[in-house]
Image (tube, rainbow, N blue to C red):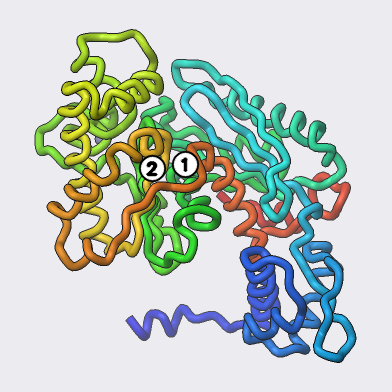
């Protein structure tokens, strides 16, 4: 093991060091807010001289801006630095089963606007999705008055598996089996595209800005129409060999159980996915023509009132408890964040019961070490999370920004990635 690591080791170049230093300062400014060079040096452990040099580069590139001064003890006032939000526009997209949501942000991820586009009911055609995204981005830039700011990139969250080796999207829920969405978007938009599973992008949004803040080892459980999880180990999203890790909704919890839309049986999603809950509530009340969201909401309102809802709620809480117990036993998270529209709709009524069942299914010690909390960002955080993919690339220094006014710079083409 040690030998392998040794032979693979690469010489660290001056450029690597500069990039790592830039990244450290940018992260400090992005997550910690505006501060002086002195504070940056204290917080990153870099020398004052290095901070001065790196900040000069960042100011020249326009990534960082001066934001006034603060008094120092007797000395001359210190300049405060911040991420230059207006430097570029970042786009986040949530590709849903019937609509795409497109949100525009500045570089500090302050929201500039959002547009929804309906894309059909029987699984959206990829061409329609791509055209809708392009059109929505133009509309957003016009409305927000940022036509002149260059686009840093577009992040996309999509249900299903995004294979990072071939860049293809495999999604049973929207009927896509190997759709080259990233390549199609790059062709259409001519900007960097980052794409990931929607559960993972929502998870990253909760970790950066919501209920996951401050946790290093956490699982964000996405309970929506489908069920998935984003698992963060030591602050990093766990992806697996080809980035399909986290398909927690298809963990079997009942051997030979209900048919799931993935083709298997007894999956957690077959009990706790929005589609499954709606199906089961319609069965319980003897029919009903309302759509999935209305049906799940009606079920939620009936909990504690209608004995049929009580029975289903109790079963659902136990199925979720078994699922959460699996997360606890496998990953030993310090926190589980319950997100997604089903999680946020039913969570307030069910969370205490789900905790009790999790206690019964998880090992005692890791259960005592985990808190199970509701997400803070609402069900629309998939697009925000998708935008973090782009910002993460900029902060890490592997996604360069185009110059203001230019459509595309050569450095950006090199940085294209899945
Ligand atoms: Zn399944």
**Residue visible at 87% across and 90% down in the picture:** 75
Q: Which residue is drawn at 41% across and 25% down?
A: 175
Q: Is residue 168 above or below residue 325?
A: above
Which element carries disc 2, helix, strand or loop?
strand
Per the image, the residue denoted by label 1 is 198
| Viewer-closest of 41 and 34 | 34
The label number, if any, that marks residue 215 in the structure image: none
* Camera-nearest label, 1 or 2: 2
* Viewer-closest of 4 and 381: 381
Q: Which residue is at 27% across, 39% downward? A: 350
Left or right of residue 388: residue 271: left
Res. 165 visible in picture = no
Residue that carries the numbered disc 2 in the rendered image: 222
Q: Can residue 36 be seen in this view?
A: yes
Q: Is residue 352 left or right of residue 235?
A: left
Image height of 216 relative to 148, above or below? below
Is the CB atom of the residue marked by disc 2 within 8 angstroms of ligand 1's nearest atom? no
Residue 26 percent coordinates (x, y): 68, 68
Q: In which quarter of the image is the N terminus?
A: bottom left
Residue 49 image point, x, y percent: 78, 89
Give how far apart the Cα atoms at labels 1 and 2 are.
Answer: 9 Å
């Amino acid at each position: 093991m040690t030998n392998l690591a040794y032979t693979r080791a690469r010489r660290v170049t001056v450029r690597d060091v500069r990039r790592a230093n830039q990244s450290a300062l940018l992260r400090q400014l992005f997550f910690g807010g505006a501060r002086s060079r002195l504070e940056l040096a204290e917080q990153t452990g870099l020398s004052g001289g290095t901070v001065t040099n790196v900040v000069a580069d960042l100011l020249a590139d326009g990534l960082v801006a001066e934001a006034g001064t603060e008094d120092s003890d007797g000395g001359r006032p210190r300049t405060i630095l911040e991420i230059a939000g207006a430097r570029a526009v970042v786009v986040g997209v949530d590709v849903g089963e019937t609509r795409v949501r497109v949100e525009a942000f500045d570089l500090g991820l302050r929201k500039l606007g959002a547009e929804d586009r309906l894309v059909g009911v029987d699984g959206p055609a990829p061409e329609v999705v791509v055209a809708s995204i392009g059109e929505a981005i133009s509309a957003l830039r016009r409305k927000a008055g940022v036509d002149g700011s260059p686009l840093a990139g577009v992040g996309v969250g999509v249900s299903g598996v995004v294979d990072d080796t071939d860049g293809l999207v495999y999604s049973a829920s929207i009927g896509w089996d190997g759709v080259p969405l990233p390549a199609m978007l790059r062709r259409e938009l001519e900007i960097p595209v980052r794409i990931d599973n929607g559960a993972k992008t929502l998870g990253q949004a909760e970790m950066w800005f919501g209920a996951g803040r401050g946790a290093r080892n956490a699982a964000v459980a996405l309970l929506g129409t489908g069920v998935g999880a984003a698992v963060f180990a030591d602050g990093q999203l766990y992806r697996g060999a080809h980035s399909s890790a986290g398909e927690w909704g298809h963990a079997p919890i009942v051997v030979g159980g209900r048919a799931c839309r993935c083709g298997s049986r007894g999956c957690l999603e077959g009990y706790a996915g929005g589609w499954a809950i709606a199906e089961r509530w319609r069965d319980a009340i003897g029919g009903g023509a309302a759509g999935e969201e209305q049906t799940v909401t009606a079920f939620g309102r009936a909990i504690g009132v209608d004995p049929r809802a009580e029975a289903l709620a109790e079963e659902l809480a136990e199925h979720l408890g078994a699922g959460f117990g699996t997360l606890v036993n496998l990953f030993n998270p310090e926190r589980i964040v319950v997100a997604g529209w089903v999680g946020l709709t039913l969570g307030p009524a069910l969370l205490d019961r789900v905790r009790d069942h999790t206690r019964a299914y998880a090992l005692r010690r890791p259960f005592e070490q985990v808190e199970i909390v509701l997400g803070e960002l609402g069900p629309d955080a998939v697009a925000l999370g998708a935008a973090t993919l782009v910002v993460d690339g900029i902060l890490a220094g592997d996604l360069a920004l185009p110059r203001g006014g230019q459509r595309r710079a050569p450095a950006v083409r090199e940085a294209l990635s899945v």
